[in-house]
Image (tube, helix red, strand yellow):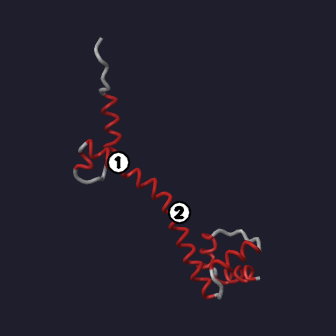
């Protein structure tokens, strides 16, 4: 009995890899061994950076809050501690948006956190 070969399945499998490498330059798009390496490495970067983006946004919100709080005479750590004591449950993203778009409301939140 002859040995079964992958045939069409092998080509379909390779096509998935080549499709993922669309837009890459030179051999990273056309040469099988380089395509596999490039697509695998791209997946590693994508996985890592999905988490990194979240981290960087949180850093941005904290920097914005610190800048807004400096003008109101309180630092970031005391503000967050005051919010916890006052049972105000707003996340950093919402606080930074309020600080940018509605300074009076933000000043009221800061006053509540101070007291």
- Residue 54 badge: 2
For residue 46, what is the image quadrant?
A: bottom left
CA distance for labels 1 and 2: 23 Å
Q: Secondary structure at mark 1?
A: helix
Q: Position of residue 93 (x, y in %)?
A: 60, 69
Left or right of residue 15, residue 81 in this image = right
Crowding at mark 2 (Cα within 10 Å: few <14, some 14-19, many 20+): few
The residue shown at (75%, 80%) is: 112
For residue 78, what is the image quadrant?
A: bottom right
For residue 63, what is the image quadrant?
A: bottom right
The residue shown at (33%, 44%) is: 19
Residue closer to the observer: 76 or 29: 76
The residue shown at (76%, 71%) is: 87
Q: Quadrant of the C terminus?
A: bottom right
- Residue 39 badge: 1
Q: Position of residue 9 (x, y in %)?
A: 34, 29
């Amino acid at each position: 009995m002859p040995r079964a070969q992958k045939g069409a399945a092998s080509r379909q499998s390779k096509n998935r890899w080549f499709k993922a490498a669309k837009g890459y330059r030179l051999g990273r798009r056309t040469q099988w061994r380089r395509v596999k390496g490039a697509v695998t490495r791209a997946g590693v970067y994508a996985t890592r950076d999905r988490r990194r983006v979240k981290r960087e946004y949180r850093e941005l919100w904290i920097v914005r809050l610190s800048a807004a709080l400096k003008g109101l005479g309180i630092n970031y750590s005391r503000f967050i501690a005051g919010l916890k004591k006052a049972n105000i449950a707003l996340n950093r993203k919402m606080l930074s948006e309020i600080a940018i778009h509605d300074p009076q409301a933000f000043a009221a939140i800061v006053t509540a956190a101070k007291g």
